[in-house]
Amino acid sequence: LVRLRQRLAGSQSGLGRGLLALLSRDRLDEDTWESIEDVLITADVGVQPTQELVERLRTRLRVEGHADPRAILREELVALVDPDMDRRLQVTGSDGKPGVVLVVGVNGAGKTTTVGKIARILVAEDRSVVLGAADTFRAAAVDQLATWGERVGVEVVRGPEGGDPASVAFEAVKSGVERAIDTVIVDTAGRLQNKQGLMDELGKVKRVVEKQAPVTEVLLVLDATTGQNGLVQARVFSEVVAVSGIVLTKLDGSAKGGIVVQVQRELGVPVKLVGLGEGPDDLAPFSAEAFVDALLG
Ligand code: GDP
């Protein structure tokens, strides 16, 4: 939470403070409400959620008065971010088999980095982990994952450059099953050249994995700085594979934290983790309350 606060301080706590300053005005005229809408839309909260939020704020301030606008704003923002979603990572398999986490998303979103960071968290919890470098189309991605593996102290299964991603995924899970590993995390390729290609590729990865062990989590990694574009990507991926959780990266460099609200609505799945920097410890579980508190500063 402390880190979330610090990292958001420079970028988007301006959102919370800006809203609070506007709400604390003596007279909330139409211009002020328009400014409030502008602040929310600029932060990527989305038009529909913004209108709903403003409607609720207006009603509550009218009924409850202006004594504590901060408390009202906090409650309504937390409700908007949906505190009731189950945000726990599903990393535990069944019948003695490893849990398998597939990590998907477009190139550059932060997939490989996120795989490394998750491995680090699991290892710190005394779980055994194997990584699969199934992003075989980018040699750099495979090397990058191998570096993470060394850093965290876990095995990385890799195939030949340009090889079949599904066969790397297969080998990684096979190794996990044979060695009774707790969790296998598979870094997939993120070429979004066409939907059919992506569908074929991720579908095959999922099928070969499921022959050996349950896919317990499909995490979609999205770059928070890409705004509406990120939403379009999210839609494509969710049509291709059943996404179970979202990792929102680069929240440290973005003033657009409102994307959390939009992407959850769009996909109907929770943001489970947020990336707050490039370092190994810069990944945090997401909580609606902590997020809103960080926004409000
Ligand atoms: P991939 O192509 O999806 O596997 O993306 P990478 O993991 O290679 O990440 C792309 C770039 O984004 C790298 O320079 C990462 O260090 C950087 N990156 C990843 N996550 C974060 C984050 O949460 N914050 C910041 N600031 N940079 C990040």
Image: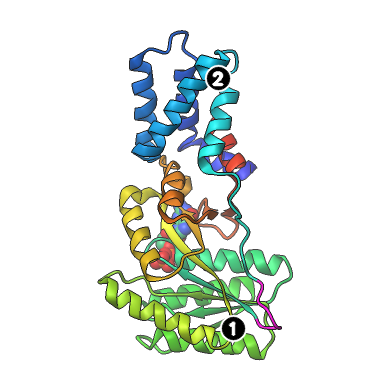
The quadrant in which the N terminus is found is: top right
Check the image and report above or below for 156 versus 256.
Answer: below
Please give left or right for residue 110 compared with residue 86 in the image: left
| x then y, percent, for residue 64 | 57, 16
Bounds of the magenta span? 92-97
Residue placed under numbered mark 1 in the picture = 213
Classify residue 155 by image quadrant.
Answer: bottom right
Numbered mark located on residue 69 in the image: 2
Residue drawn at the location 52% of the way across and 80% of the way down: 132
Check the image and report above or below for 22 versus 102.
Answer: above
Image coloring type: rainbow
Check the image and report above or below for 279 versus 262.
Answer: below
Q: Residue furthest right?
A: 126
Dot 1: within a 10 Å radius of its alpha carbon, few (fewer than 14), some, or many (20 or more) residues? many
Residue drawn at the location 39% of the way across and 25% of the way down: 36
Question: Is residue 98 in the magenta section?
Answer: no
